[in-house]
Image (cartoon, grey):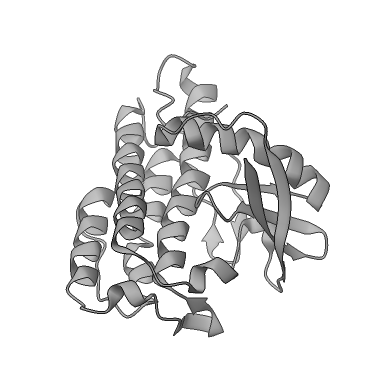
Amino acid sequence: MKIECVWEHNGNDTLLYAANLPGVYARGSNLEIAMEKLLPDVCSYLAWAGLPSPGNMSFEVVQDAVCDLNIADADSDVLFHSERIPLTFDEYMNLKGLALKSAKDFHTLYSTIPDVDTSDLPIRSTFYGQVPRTAREMYNHTKNVNAYYFAEIGIDADNEGTISECRQRGFEKLEGRSDFLSNSVHDGSYGELWTLRKVLRRFLWHDRIHAKAMYRMAVRVFGSDAVPNIFCFE
């Protein structure tokens, strides 16, 4: 299996994405380190999605995206070349299904944390404020990008209810537009370009970042048997 990679970087500081597996990513201080870390994330993603192991894998950088943002804080504004292509209905339903599964699993993980206000993480500030430390902060932060992501492609969504509920309502509003599969490019906030494909990928990517942080923190604080490894993280 060939993994087509998008390399977003500020200097050497790197975010590496698997363009043909939306949501898979690795971060590193340079491309080589990120490339080494990408393989286990591919494997965990395939296990979580219920997809077969690909056996031998090769990696190819298909897009080099220089970025002015602070990559170390997981900031990103890249639009993949492949994210400009119109969607078929089957592609949309598959990606939507993954985005909704991710939201459901994120909520399930959160619901199993013995104390959602306990954390062993230090206080750290980034461009968007303090990094979420507790499970409650991680959950609310992840849920509350819903209205923002949908708004970037012109959909008036909200953040009410659970992460699954507000995401589902956003998709319902999206599907009320007859041309939503055209995957139009939108000039969103801060000059960032967005498409529906990018929104679907960003939901999966953002969920995985904070699910991984939540799971690892919970294992350290409460023990490996306290929470389910629902995202199949290594």
Q: What residue sits 29% from the left and 55% below the top?
A: 93
Q: Quadrant of residue 63?
A: bottom right
Q: What residue sits 58% from the left and 26% below the top?
A: 234
> Residue 138's spot in the image, x, y percent?
43, 46
Image position of 224 (left or right of 147): right
Identify whether 196 is placed above or below 191. Answer: above
> Residue 198's spot in the image, x, y percent?
46, 66
> Residue 160's spot in the image, x, y percent?
21, 59
| Residue 162 seen | no
Identify whether 105 is placed above or below 156. Answer: above
Q: Quadrant of the N terminus?
A: top right
> Residue 73's spot in the image, x, y percent?
64, 57
Image position of 65 (left or right of 86): right
Q: What residue sits 54% from the left and 67% below the top?
A: 82
Using the image as rendered, state which of residue 140 and residue 155 is in the foreground: 155
Q: What residue sits 67% from the left and 31% below the top?
A: 56
